Image: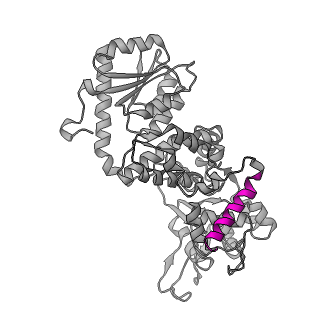
């Protein structure tokens, strides 16, 4: 916004958004700052989110209050997640240590006890502007650091997600095996990384492997490695993922896709922390922590003879189920703004936010593809949008909304309705799964999951699609 030679704007162009329920404090701000800055007030919590997103503010002043109708710390967390480079100055009438510490931990630039002299307040504002400018200037150096594994920066305003985060914080302090369950797109991979980078193994490797994306014949080699000449095509020695992760953490995504033979070898690794490469006779010891994830019902797979019961109990020492997006609707709006900021940076296209009608629609959608579908929808809408705010027409233009647009009025009919929609899409695409996934606006992997879930099959497919893993 400003050149390097003039990074700090003059006082008369600086805008302050002030969230302050107290009429007395608002009068103080007006008398002390209105002559030098442009002030915008929000007296209550009903429209504060919309007001913050309606225009650009240089600084946000957040007054703590017990009767504001909105948790001030929740608002602070939301602001720092959606507007990470906007400085927030928290104010209060007492220097309560707990409030000061919590404010700074959540990302506040400063905590100010009122009343304060006008000169000192202006100095704090100037320091906040300088701090923001420095962050903006070095931002390009940190573009590659797309993911910051910080529990306190994870969007979790819904009660169910707050409980999950608190549980994972406790899990990260242990060294036990963890099983994460939940639908596709709920963030299992990201949270596994967060657990690792907040554990005692944080300085050691974090290795991930998606067991569903690797053919069964190659998965064992991927996990444990192989010796040169051990099979056709093994022209050199390969170090497996367990060996690469020595001392650190290995994340086994979609563990329910592993065949029984590989499950037996995996059980030995967990019990003895040892294995042999394919074609080798040397026992390799590797101390790793295992975090496993699945979107399948492993207990059902055990009863069907598809998953080893002893392995299940070994990986299920600590378990957590991640809620789908439809069960954490309070998080949809802040997630959407965070994704919008991230995607707009990548696309180098800036919009101010979402139109009110569009956001209401997004909050009412069930998002069967969860966060991944939400991200894809926002990316498409951003590309199509030609105004300052993303309109509803560009959001629902996403093909993935076919499933939601035909959503039945009665929740009990949702399963049969979604199955019918998937079958109709497959018919229109001549039963080509990849084309049907594109038409529905979901990933082939999500479609594959739903085909298995609803036991959909067709004679044209080489195998019963309910157990087929290929074709995409």
- Magenta-highlighted stretch: main secondary structure? helix
In the rendered image, is residue 271 in sight? no
419 relative position to 239: left or right: right
Q: Camera-side residue: 411 or 179? A: 411
From the viewer's perspective, tell me whether residue 163 is left or right of residue 309. Answer: left
Quarter of the image where one finds residue 24: top left
Q: What colour-coding does the image apply?
A: one colour
In the rendered image, which quarter contains the C terminus? bottom right
Expressed as whole percent of the image width and height from the top left, the position of residue 36 reads 27, 19
- Picture quarter with the N terminus: top left
What residue span does the magenta drawing correspond to? 413-430
Q: Residue reaching furthest left?
A: 5
Q: Position of residue 370 (x, y in %)?
A: 59, 52
The answer to whether residue 148 is magenta is no
Residue at left offset 18%, top offset 38%? 5
* Residue 359 in sight here: yes
Across and down, in percent, residue 442 comes to 58, 61
């Amino acid at each position: 916004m400003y050149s390097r030679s003039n990074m700090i704007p003059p006082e008369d162009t600086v805008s302050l958004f002030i969230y302050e329920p107290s009429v007395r404090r608002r009068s103080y701000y007006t008398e002390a700052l209105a002559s030098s800055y442009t002030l915008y007030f929000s007296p209550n919590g009903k429209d504060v989110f919309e007001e913050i997103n309606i225009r650009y503010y240089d600084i946000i002043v957040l007054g703590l209050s017990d009767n504001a109708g909105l948790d001030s710390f929740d608002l602070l967390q939301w602001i720092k997640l959606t507007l990470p480079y906007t400085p927030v100055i928290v104010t209060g009438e007492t220097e309560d240590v707990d409030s000061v510490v919590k404010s700074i931990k959540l990302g506040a630039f400063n905590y100010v006890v009122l009343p304060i002299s006008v000169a000192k307040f202006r100095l704090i504002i100037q320091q906040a502007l300088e701090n923001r400018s420095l962050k903006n200037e070095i931002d390009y150096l940190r573009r590659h650091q797309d993911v910051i594994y910080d529990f306190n920066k994870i969007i979790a305003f819904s009660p169910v997600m707050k409980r999950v985060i608190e549980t994972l914080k406790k899990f990260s302090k242990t060294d036990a095996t963890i099983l994460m369950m939940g639908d596709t797109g709920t963030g299992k991979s990201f949270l596994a990384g967060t657990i690792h980078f907040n554990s005692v193994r944080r300085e050691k490797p974090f290795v991930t492997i998606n067991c569903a994306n690797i053919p069964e014949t190659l998965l064992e080699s991927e996990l444990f490695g192989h010796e040169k000449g051990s099979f056709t095509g093994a022209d050199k020695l390969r170090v497996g993922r367990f060996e690469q992760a020595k001392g650190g953490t290995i994340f086994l995504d979609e563990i329910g896709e592993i065949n029984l033979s590989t499950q037996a070898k995996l059980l030995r690794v967990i019990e003895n922390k040892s294995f042999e490469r394919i074609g080798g006779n040397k026992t390799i010891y590797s101390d790793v922590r295992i975090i496993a994830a699945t979107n399948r019902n492993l207990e059902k797979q055990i009863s069907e003879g598809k998953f080893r019961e002893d392995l299940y109990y070994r990986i299920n020492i600590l378990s957590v189920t991640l809620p789908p997006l439809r069960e954490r609707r309070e998080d949809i709006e802040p997630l959407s703004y965070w994704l919008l900021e991230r995607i707009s940076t990548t696309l180098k296209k800036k919009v101010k936010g979402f139109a009110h009608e569009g956001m209401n629609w997004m909050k009412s959608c069930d998002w069967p593809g969860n966060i991944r579908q939400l991200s894809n929808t926002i990316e498409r809408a951003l590309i199509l949008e030609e105004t300052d705010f993303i309109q509803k027409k560009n959001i629902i233009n996403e093909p993935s909304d076919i499933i939601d647009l035909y959503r039945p009025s009665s929740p009990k009919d949702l399963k049969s309705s979604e199955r019918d929609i998937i079958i109709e899409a497959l018919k229109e695409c001549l039963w080509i799964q990849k084309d049907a996934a594109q038409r529905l606006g979901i990933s082939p992997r999500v479609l594959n999951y739903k085909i298995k879930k609803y036991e959909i099959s067709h004679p044209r497919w080489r195998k019963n699609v309910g157990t087929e893993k290929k074709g995409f």
